[in-house]
């Protein structure tokens, strides 16, 4: 493995409070030193990062890779390559694969295939209940031992509150973080868009904010009862963010993330029945978007994720309610977050924190930082380069995004995983 020196870049490492023009030196897949090279160090590769940002590799808490079971949509190889192109070095794969990640064998197979592809570190999320059915608890300890970074029930909320309590108690016993999709399925009632003026005008069945806030309130009560560390995946409404801010103030073991697109799009974007804006949870009001932005800024929401869901073209070619929800989002995670810096929502170090040490700390991962001895997972990007998102340039197999044709600022030039260059522009 080559020794590498990254020279002349603006190094931003929020976890260690570093923001300065510094050289960075890598040996044996780990950060050897910042600043001057150690005596006797010789670099086999020198990367000139002048006028670029050097930061930890991004950590994405939710990205569906579609393998195993849905390879007609995407594969581990294709999506981890797209992740590397987006500066992502670690991602969490939700358990709703086919077969479901409810046995150690499936978790180990996903990790093995990701290692063979070599583009990105993939951490499976184990199923909280067998078959995601919400009835029988999974073998949580065995899933943790097989490399699952957390447990969750994907987009299948557990309707029985007693079973939810037992699941959180069991997870707490083994010190496992539980990822929760906050939704009351009865209140959702088959809806496909935010319950509001736009859905009413378009004749679409709505999902009220209460479907999210009721679930958040229930699960916070159970977290307090059980002591389980819970993380709310993919908030969509301001009311839920306010409840979680209060819970964090009260020192409950709770955290939350938001998908990058929820910080830019609103219910107005589903006008003309744009199926690329069919999402679960749905796009909500401008007020919700602003409240989510405020929560990201003040740390109530400590991570921004892609919530990547690639689909084949046919999945989006039907009447709006019948289309598959989700956005192909790996390649827009960084530029959408950088747009928040342009719009003065976040400072640049703060934005990078929400993509690196923020998500890493949620799962107690020793990642998202550039201190000496840390894994050399690194993203280098040009903050001033503008580019346009086109299907021809996307590396993800899924092209289902409402951002096609949009211009972005900020382009990844290099991604390093454990000291190996896995993407270079």
Image (cartoon, grey):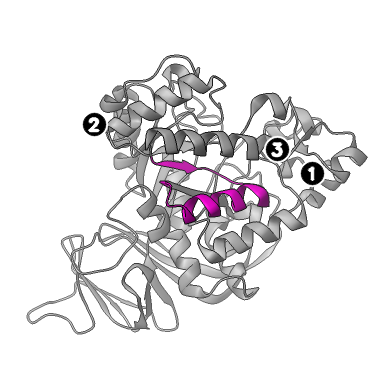
For the residues labelled 1 and 3, say whether their Cβ atoms are less than 8 Å apart.
no
Q: State yes or no: discs 2 and 3 in contact (Cβ < 8 Å).
A: no
Residue that label 3 marks? 210
Tell me the distance, in whole angstroms, between the alpha carbons under discs 2 and 3: 37 Å
Quarter of the figure that contains the N terminus: bottom left
Chain-order first, disc 1 or disc 3: 3
Residue 240 image offset from top left, x and y in percent: 62, 47
What residue is at 56 percent from the left and 71 percent from the top? 346
Q: Nearer the viewer, residue 290 or 91?
A: 290
Quote the CA–CA distance across marks 1 and 2: 42 Å
Q: Between label 2 and label 3, give the one nearer the viewer.
A: 3
Asked whether 116 or 64 is in front, the reply is 64
Look at the image and tell me whether residue 392 can be seen. no
Give the class, few, some or many, for how many residues have Cα within 10 Å of label 1's Cα (few <14, many ≥20): some
Which residue is farthest right? 201
Pointer 3 local density, CA inside 10 Å: few below 14, some 14–19, many at least 20: some
Residue at disc 1, secondary structure: loop
Query: Front-most of 138 and 110?
Result: 138
Q: Residue furthest top?
A: 136
Mark 1 and mark 2 lie on one chain; the one further toward the N terminus is: 2
Q: Is 232 within the magenta?
A: yes
Can residue 302 be seen here? The reply is: yes
Percent x, y of residue 156: 55, 26
Q: What x and y, as percent, mark residue 97?
A: 47, 27
Q: Nearer the viewer, residue 310 or 71?
A: 310
Task: Write the start and end of the magenta stretch as one range.
Answer: 229-253
Q: Which mark is residue 274?
A: 1
Q: Which mark is residue 145?
A: 2
């Amino acid at each position: 493995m080559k020794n590498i020196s990254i020279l002349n870049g603006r190094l931003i490492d929020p976890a260690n409070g570093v923001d300065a023009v510094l050289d960075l030196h890598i040996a044996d897949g780990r950060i050897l030193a910042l600043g001057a090279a150690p005596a006797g160090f010789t670099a086999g590769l020198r990367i000139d990062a002048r006028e670029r940002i050097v930061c930890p590799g991004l950590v994405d808490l939710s990205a569906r890779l579609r393998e195993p079971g849905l390879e007609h949509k995407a594969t581990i190889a294709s999506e981890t390559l797209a992740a590397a192109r987006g500066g992502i070095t670690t991602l969490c794969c939700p358990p709703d694969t086919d077969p479901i990640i409810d046995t150690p064998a499936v978790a180990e197979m996903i990790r093995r295939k990701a290692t063979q592809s070599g583009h990105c570190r993939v951490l499976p999320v184990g199923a909280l209940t067998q078959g995601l059915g919400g009835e029988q608890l999974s073998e949580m300890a065995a899933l943790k031992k097989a490399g699952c970074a957390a447990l969750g029930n994907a987009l299948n909320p557990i309707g029985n509150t007693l079973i939810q309590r037992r699941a959180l108690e069991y997870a707490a016993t083994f010190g496992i973080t539980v990822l929760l999709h906050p939704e009351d399925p009865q209140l959702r009632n088959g809806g496909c868009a935010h319950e509001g003026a736009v859905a009413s005008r378009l004749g679409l069945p709505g999902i009220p904010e209460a479907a999210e806030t009721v679930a958040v309130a229930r699960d916070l009560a159970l977290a307090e009862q059980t002591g389980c560390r819970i993380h709310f995946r993919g908030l969509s409404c301001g009311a839920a963010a306010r409840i979680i801010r209060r819970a964090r103030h009260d020192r409950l073991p709770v955290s939350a993330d938001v998908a990058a697109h929820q910080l830019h799009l609103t219910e107005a974007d589903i006008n003309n029945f744009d199926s690329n804006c069919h999402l679960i949870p749905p796009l909500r009001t401008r007020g919700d978007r602003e409240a989510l932005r405020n929560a990201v800024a003040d740390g109530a929401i400590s991570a921004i994720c892609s919530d990547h869901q690639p689909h084949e073209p046919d999945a989006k070619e039907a009447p709006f309610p019948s289309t598959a929800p989700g956005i192909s989002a790996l390649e827009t995670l960084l530029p959408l977050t950088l747009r928040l810096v342009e719009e003065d929502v976040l400072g640049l170090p703060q934005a990078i924190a929400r993509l690196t040490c923020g998500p890493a700390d949620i799962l107690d991962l020793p990642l998202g930082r550039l201190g000496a001895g840390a894994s050399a997972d690194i993203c280098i990007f040009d903050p001033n380069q503008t580019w346009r998102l086109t299907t021809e340039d996307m590396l993800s197999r899924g092209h289902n995004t409402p951002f096609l044709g949009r211009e972005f600022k900020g382009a990844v030039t290099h991604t390093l995983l454990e000291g190996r260059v896995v993407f270079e522009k």
